[in-house]
Amino acid sequence: MASVSVELNSNNSILRGALIDRTAPMETGMDVVPEVSGTQSSTQPRRQRSTSLRHAREVGETSASHTHRVPASQYVTIGVWMVLLFIEYGLVRLMCDLGVPPDHTADDDIIKVLSDFQFLLFAGFVLAILTGINWPDRFLYIFCFQTRQPRGYMFLAAFFLSGIGWGFLDLFPGLSEFSLTEINLAYAIPLLALLLGAIALIVMHLWMAYRHNSWSGFFAYFLSRCALFAFYSSYLVVKMQTQHKDSVVFHFHHYAVGFLAASLAEFNHPLSVLLLACGTGVFVQGIAAYDADPILAKPSYYVECFGVRSPLMRDEVAQFVTSHMRCRPHTSG
């Protein structure tokens, strides 16, 4: 009985370290979750997972091949995260039914709705991995509802209010036409404020990545975000090419801005948690209210009036023309 008690105490300390405290660098070879096997005797050491590639190779060469490798806690955290995204989606659609924002798209096309769900699921999952939501200790840090550390209340309030509040911006004439795609000098001040705020957030998170990580941890954070930002920058590069300048429509939707902003928020810091909440809220609002439309798209509609065919145009332009003129819209396909 003494050996059994010693082993249980050891396993509990390892499990607490995995669920609550992940302060050690991830490249140190820290064991995080013990393998549980019903056939092991109480005197045999349990095989453990590791977050270090070097140490994981040693463990992997001797571990059983048919064990379940993903802790159940990761499924729980990802599941809760996805539920939150869909609750936000539903609240935004409810506000759309109330006319906020007034230019929202209809949700009567089930095929389009399922396409939006697909994008929300996969992009939401990627965002959870980038920001560590799947780690139980990170999840418990964000959703902490203790009296002295009410981060969970702060996150939920910022998350839901940012998604709903973004729609109210369209009710103000001075902000309803603001766009990141087209530069308008009339919106120079909010554009400059947004640019300075973005730079400040990026610098702050790079400093936290540098200050609190090893060099390998810092470069992992830096290079992964550079790759993500470079991918979205490629849309603009394609648009600026001569052969695509007039044949491709470029619109950098605010759901992409929210996604990129939230992807930075990896750290256990109140400002980083607040950025994750607001960025994710804007990301979901953009999909729920305006669909997950592509950033680059080829115009596919034209109108025909009195036997004269117009050039190809976007769907919303064709709808505007047909609503004010006796023309019929057609698709190029």
Image (cartoon, grey):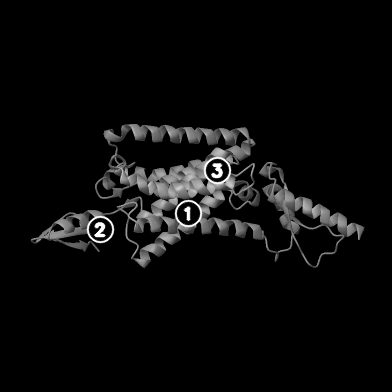
* Residue 232 seen by the camera: yes
**Is 331 on the left or on the right of 280, as rendered?**
left
Of the numbered discs 3 and 1, the one sitting upstream in the chain is 1
Question: In 3D space, how far apart are the residues under numbered discs 2 and 1 (Cα atoms)?
Answer: 26 Å
Label 2: element kind: loop
Q: For the N terminus, which image quadrant? A: bottom right
User: Can you tell which quarter of the image residue 22 is in?
Assistant: top right
Q: What residue type is labelled 3?
A: Val
Q: Which of marks 2 and 3 is in front?
A: 3
Q: Measuring from the top left, give residue 259's x and y in whole percent.
A: 46, 47
Which circle, 2 or 1, is nearer the viewer? 1
Q: Distance between the residues labelled 2 and 3?
A: 41 Å
> Disc 2 marks which residue?
300
Q: Looking at the image, is mark 3 or mark 1 nearer the viewer?
A: 3
Q: List x then y, in percent, for residue 208.
A: 58, 35
Residue on which disc 3 sits: 273
Q: Which residue is drawn at 47% across and 54% down?
A: 123
Could you classify mark 3 by the number of other residues whose Cα lies within 10 Å: few (under 14), some (14-19), or many (20 or more)? many
* Mark positioned earlier in the residue sequence (2 or 3): 3
Q: Name the residue under label 1.
A: 123
Q: Where is residue 17 in the image (x, y as percent from the top left)?
A: 73, 48
Residue at 28 percent of width and 50 percent of height: 248
Q: SS of the residue at dot 1?
A: helix
Indicate the quadrant containing the C terminus: top left, top right, bottom left or bottom right: bottom left
Mark 1 closeness class: few <14, some 14–19, many ≥20 residues within 10 Å? some
Image vertical order of residue 115 relative to residue 211, above or below: below
